[in-house]
Amino acid sequence: MDYNKVDKKTISSLGQIVGEENIIVDKAALEDYAHDETPLYKSMPDLAVKPGSTEEVSKIMKLANANIIPVTPRSGGTSLSAGAVPIHGGIVLLLERMNKIKEIDKKNMMVIVEPGIITEQLGNELAKHGLFFPPDPVSLDTCMIGGNIAECAGGPRAMKYGVTKNYVLGIEIVLPDGTVQRYGGKLLKNVTGYNIIDLIIGSEGTLAIVTEATLKVLPVPTVIIDLLVPFKCVENSVNFALDVLQTGLMPAAIEFMEGNVYRIVAKYLKRKLPFEQANAHTIVEIDGNDKEQVRKTYDKIGDIALKYGALDVFVGESAKDKEKIWEPRKNASDALKEMANPVAREDLVVPKDKIPELIKKLKDCVKKYSANLYAFGHLGDGNIHADIGMEEKGSFEVRNLGRWDKRIEIANDKCQSQSLRINDTEKINKMRKEVYEITLSLGGTITAEHGIGLSKIQYLEMALDKTQIEIMRSIKKIFDPKNILNPGKIFTSSVRTRHGVSQQYGLSLQHRIERR
């Protein structure tokens, strides 16, 4: 398949659809849309376009489909699997203008939204009506509902409340050829044929573009109390969590930060945090509508914590105290990005009791490659985020998605001359393969909520067999026979780039590293 370059005629046609003010062609401005939050991946689009309605999205896709131009949908750009990187150039479709809450239906406990609404903003509006949307990715202040649906986002509360797919009851979508379709609605039950909604959720923008969603919402719990529980070791923290869950107390969240992550966050925040010497920090959130019952629950959880050697149990009841407890966890990702030189940001999942073994084996693994492991994440559902940072520093030479060799200096805020040295991408690929082998051997899998995107393509066959992958490819072909919608994601694909270079994307690419 040969993709066509966006030319002046196409730009003119797009301007007629969305207005010239909603098209970005300036190269400096397009830099923001050449990457997401995934380390090591960057590729420039030809342009970015901002539709304001389903009709405009449909017209853009009809134009792209007729001219065989790749389109990469983009919401908040917070992907950690390079899912929003336009590796074939073409059009980046920005959904930020489509940010309306169309209806808050308190009687039916549902809300109808456009994909560009920021998750936190939706939460703030729902709170005015005594409602909330449970999925709460840590990036909720910047991520958007469209991206949450594309990745089936979870978050700390997933343990009790589930993930995005548990709350999407209806969708309006635009197919790659521009066809508009609607599925579901304000219905809690619906088994009329195959569940197309669940097929779209988590499909990483490769099958269709969601332009409207009907979401189930819940009443806001009237009482929320948070606990910060530091432990001497990871094993004690995990055993504590397992014991809590076996009692049936069911907190809303059990989050975890290994000690080295917690201490990096303290440096990032430039202040001392309580019990920095602890090697495992656990956050437990308890919610409900009966204050006394919630207090009884946290008393029981506190007793369990002390049984497993907790150094203390900090209780946060006021908004200020709860914010203090959650601040290190919410800043973990940004702190590691700035201070740990991550080359991989994994979201592994294993049975909960295997977490200590997973972390130990991963540390031993990455140490062989002169790298450090930074573990944190969702202890309550076995989903551990493992950032891997290289120790070696200096200049480096890598390739920008198979296009042009380029020497780039990486600078951070502390030292403009400090840079990261990566001379051998194969070294990183080999290390990541071993990380996934360890995870799979413990009964886990390679991604819990970040998706495959571009960054995990070459490892997909480790987690799924050929028949499973072929079924998925067939589904993609039915929705997108010309392969123009977010191409080069999830599956390997041999394509001819605009430079005439045939690349097997996801197999042996070297990627330009960009630090922001």
Image (cartoon, helix red, strand yellow):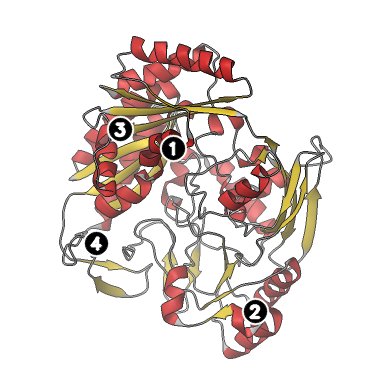
Element assignment for label 4: loop
Closer to the observer: label 3 or label 1? 1
Between the residue at mark 1 and the residue at mark 4, the CA separation in whole angstroms equals 31 Å
Closer to the observer: label 2 or label 3? 3
Dot 3 alpha-carbon crowd within 10 angstroms: few under 14, some 14 to 19, many 20 or more = many
Q: Which mark is residue 349?
A: none
Q: Earlier in the sequence, mark 1 or mark 4?
A: 1
Q: Earlier in the sequence, mark 2 or mark 3?
A: 2
> Looking at the image, do the residues carrying marks 3 and 4 touch, with CB atoms under 8 Å apart?
no
Q: Position of residue 303 (x, y in %)?
A: 40, 11
User: In the visual, does 465 lie left or right of 175?
Assistant: left
User: Which residue is at 65% across, 34% downward?
Assistant: 220
* Residue 487 sits above or below residue 223 on the image: below
Q: Which mark is residue 412?
A: 4
Dot 4 alpha-carbon crowd within 10 angstroms: few under 14, some 14 to 19, many 20 or more = some
Question: Could you say which is closer to the camera, residue 379 or residue 350?
Answer: 379
Between the residue at mark 3 and the residue at mark 1, the CA separation in whole angstroms equals 24 Å
Element assignment for label 2: helix
Element assignment for label 3: strand
Q: Which residue is mark 2?
A: 67
Q: Which residue is mark 1?
A: 320
Dot 1 alpha-carbon crowd within 10 angstroms: few under 14, some 14 to 19, many 20 or more = few
Q: Position of residue 71 (x, y in %)?
A: 58, 69
Question: Could you say which is closer to the camera, residue 375 or residue 65?
Answer: 375
Closer to the observer: label 4 or label 2? 4
Q: Which residue is mark 3?
A: 258
* Residue 330 sits above or below residue 25 on the image: above
Q: Position of residue 335 (x, y in %)?
A: 31, 49
Q: Position of residue 206 (x, y in %)?
A: 60, 57
